[in-house]
Image (cartoon, helix red, strand yellow):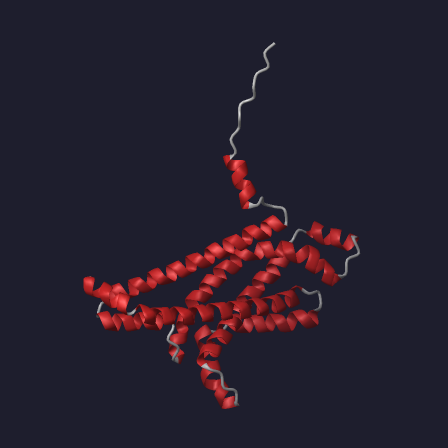
Amino acid sequence: MTDNLTTLFSYAPQLWDGLKITFLLTAGGAAGALLIALVLGLAMASPYRWLGIPARIVVEFFRGTSLLVQLFWLFYVLPLLGANLDPLSCGIFALALNYGAYSAEVVRSSIAHVDRGQWEAATALSLSPVRMMRRIIFPQAWLLMIPSLATLLIQLLKGTAVVSFITLQDLTDRIDQLRQATGDTFFAYTVGLLLYFVLAWLLQVGMDTLEHRAAVALGRREKSGRLRRVLFRRHRPKKEVLG
């Protein structure tokens, strides 16, 4: 065990390099997925069929095909068509397309679940469709989206492990190198499990904070500081008035 820990500490720079690749893939993939989700989700929620039908086809295609196959297609097939992407760009693009398709359905369903009274009130105010969506509907739908998007973000983090198949030395690849260096499969992959768990936990904390702020912005939850004052406020006994 001591030898394993010594090897782990000496291998820390390589693990850090793998963590940076995993972080870049997660951040880039999440940003691209959010953009794709908003475009496709809003298109599917649109009453115009010429927008909704093509968006639905794109979503079902990327939801219905394997992330690994999409990654291989971008890495091995695109060069045959004259488009060359480096491995990191291929990884980000594949993650964005795959998880963007899943997230688009979250966007669409969240918009559909906004209370109909809100739509009717916005219509009664004679708001344009764009302003209605931006000012009334989307902020409420955004609060509904966040828990599902948080789950997909953690799935995206774990999905970054497939990039080791296209020569990227991400965290999973570095963990495998640690296994070869220590000769201890149990130790190396336990370290990997713990590292991925910490990363996923940090993402969940961030998304919980985002959800809290979205609720505060809608007036559905108090600010944390004010909430602490309410919970831990000391109630002083009233002085009795002597007659």
Task: Please determine whether, in this image, residue 90 is positioned above or below residue 150.
Answer: below
Residue 238 position, x and y percent, is 56, 21
- Which residue of the protein is positioned furthest toward the top in this rendering? 243
In depth, the one of 25 and 141 nearer the eye is 25
Q: Is residue 113 visible?
A: no
Q: Quadrant of the N terminus?
A: bottom left
Residue 179 position, x and y percent, is 26, 70
Residue 114 position, x and y percent, is 65, 53
In depth, the one of 243 and 201 nearer the eye is 243
In depth, the one of 7 and 123 nearer the eye is 7
In depth, the one of 54 and 215 nearer the eye is 215
Task: Please determine whether, in this image, residue 67 is positioned above or below residue 215.
Answer: below
Q: Is residue 217 left or right of residue 95?
A: right
Task: Please determine whether, in this image, residue 224 is positioned above or below residue 172.
Answer: above
Q: Is residue 140 left or right of residue 83?
A: right
User: Which quarter of the figure has residue 107?
Assistant: bottom right
Q: Is residue 9 left or right of residue 120?
A: left
Q: Quadrant of the C terminus?
A: top right
Residue 12 position, x and y percent, is 31, 68
Residue drawn at 56 percent across, 19 percent down: 239
